Image (tube, rainbow, N blue to C red):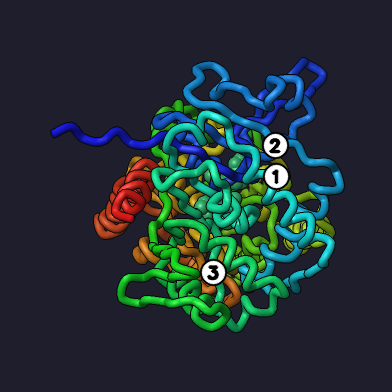
Amino acid sequence: METPQPLPLVILANREPYIHVHTPCGIETRRPASGLVSALEPVMQQKGGYWIAQGCGSADVETADRHGMIAVPPHDPTYQLKRVWLSPSEKKAYYDGFSNEALWPLFHLAHQQPIFRSSDWETYRRVNELFSRSLPHESLKAPHIFLVQDFHLALVPSLLRQNTSLTDHHQIAMVWHIPWVPSEVFRICPWATEILEGMLGADLISFHTQAYCNNFLESCERLLESRVDYARHSVTLRGHETRVRAIPLGISPEPIERLSKTEIQRFLAQEFGISPAVLGLGVDRMDYTKGILERFAALERFFELEPESLGVFSFLQIASPSRTEVPAYQEFTEKVIREAKRINHRFEGQFPATTPPIQLIHRQCDWNELGRLYQAAQICVVSPLHDGMNLVAQEYLWARSADDGALILSRFAGASQSLPQAFLVNPYDTEDLAQSLRSAHRLALRPPTPEHQARMNLLREKVGQRTSLVWAQELLNELTAV
Ligand code: ADQ
């Protein structure tokens, strides 16, 4: 019997995998710092199809054809990127406004009050409609799988289902990359029911953890006239059943495996101006949910408790600019810069210039730099206040080929569910995080013990078992089962 050919994929996401920008040296191609792109782009490279996303680079229009299409990756194209064009006011209301000022804080329990403007919501709805009408003609003529990504496009699944050109052979999955909060929190959104109804157009909705699935099912039960089947993990609304599954996302191991090994101390000194004996590392988008300020508070406490580590240990925080048009992000960035300066100033005179307590680098790094930093850092701190998954934790573990290093990981990141052998911390508890830093610092000063190597080995094994390709296959298998 012939095995059925997998259906071609159509990803619908706000973020594009390749951005073209004008620079003084000509047009450059850039990769955004985004967990969604890091994980899904290798899947598309392997499987082919279409990626529909907002075109946002200054040279995006001129590098695409008149339909907004461009074949990518640039040097060895395997799939088509189709760009959707938004006006500045649409981008402001749909992306900066409803997505990042309303939905992002709503779903992250990070004590940043969501801002619900009805004008933002109207535009969000219109932009979701625009995405759902942007399907390449070929994807309507033959069966395809639509993978709708994340909270920017919550209404797209039901809008696609209303498209009369779609047949029963087209399938729709919604991939939710961020947490889902309990219904008591979710229902403060004035358009909570519209969002649920929008998502329930999908055949399958995936979250990173079972807890998020449970919260979602409970939201449907409380806020909608729907039938929730807890045994089947499904919701039926107006005769259409949607399955809800925990399918945790992983990383793509290949870019890390391809990294060149270089002389680490020279690399650190040349690229980041530091040469500590022990390096701690944080890699995040500059975002208030990532716990960067809480991490700095714990570092300050650590240096109080271990003054002899001044001049030995530096913490390098790489923070890529993110959502820079949103006031809460502008204020947060200023606070982070101020805090790093204040803490360094507090311990002034106790460390050489090449080993500051905190070195803050406010820019995006390329893969080669990032991978080498993961290899260089004896300690990595991933301390989000709440995070759907967090791929940095997995990237760090995968880069530690010698089974050494230490991962300090927030209990409130989805990643902590599968990585319980990491140093798990409550990022709100400064003392807890500072004590974990002490333990990790002590470990870094000695050769790794067999127990610690076994622990790191186990963590690495878990990351290796759940790559983004394994994740994609599991998602597609679930859809087939539907
Ligand atoms: P993010 O919040 O963007 O995504 P996260 O999982 O932290 O996701 O991944 C960030 C990605 O960007 C990583 O691949 C990292 O290497 C890269 N990155 C971060 N800072 C960088 C920098 N300064 N320079 C270069 N690259 C940088 C959302 C959810 C997460 C979920 C992902 C995937 O919020 O919880 O894990 O989607 O589902």
Q: Read off the residue under disc 2.
A: 84
Asked whether disc 1 touches disc 2, contact meaning CB atoms under 8 Å apart, the reply is yes
In this view, the residue in front, 173 or 443, is 173
Residue 107 in picture, x, y percent from top left: 62, 68
Asked whether disc 3 touches disc 1, contact meaning CB atoms under 8 Å apart, the reply is no
Kind of residue at disc 2: Val
Per the model, the C-alpha gap separating discs 1 and 2 is 8 Å
Q: Which mark is residue 415?
A: none
Kind of residue at disc 1: Leu
- Find numbered disc 1 in the image and state the secondary structure of the residue it sits on: helix
- Find numbered disc 3 in the image and state the secondary structure of the residue it sits on: loop
In the image: residue 148, left or right of residue 186? left
Mark closer to the chain start, 1 or 2: 2
- Find numbered disc 2 in the image and state the secondary structure of the residue it sits on: strand
In this view, 193 is above or below 85: below
Residue 157 in picture, x, y percent from top left: 55, 54
Mark closer to the chain start, 3 or 1: 1
Per the model, the C-alpha gap separating discs 3 and 1 is 25 Å
Kind of residue at disc 3: Trp
Q: Read off the residue under disc 3.
A: 180
Q: Read off the residue under disc 1.
A: 130
- Quadrant location of residue 118? bottom right
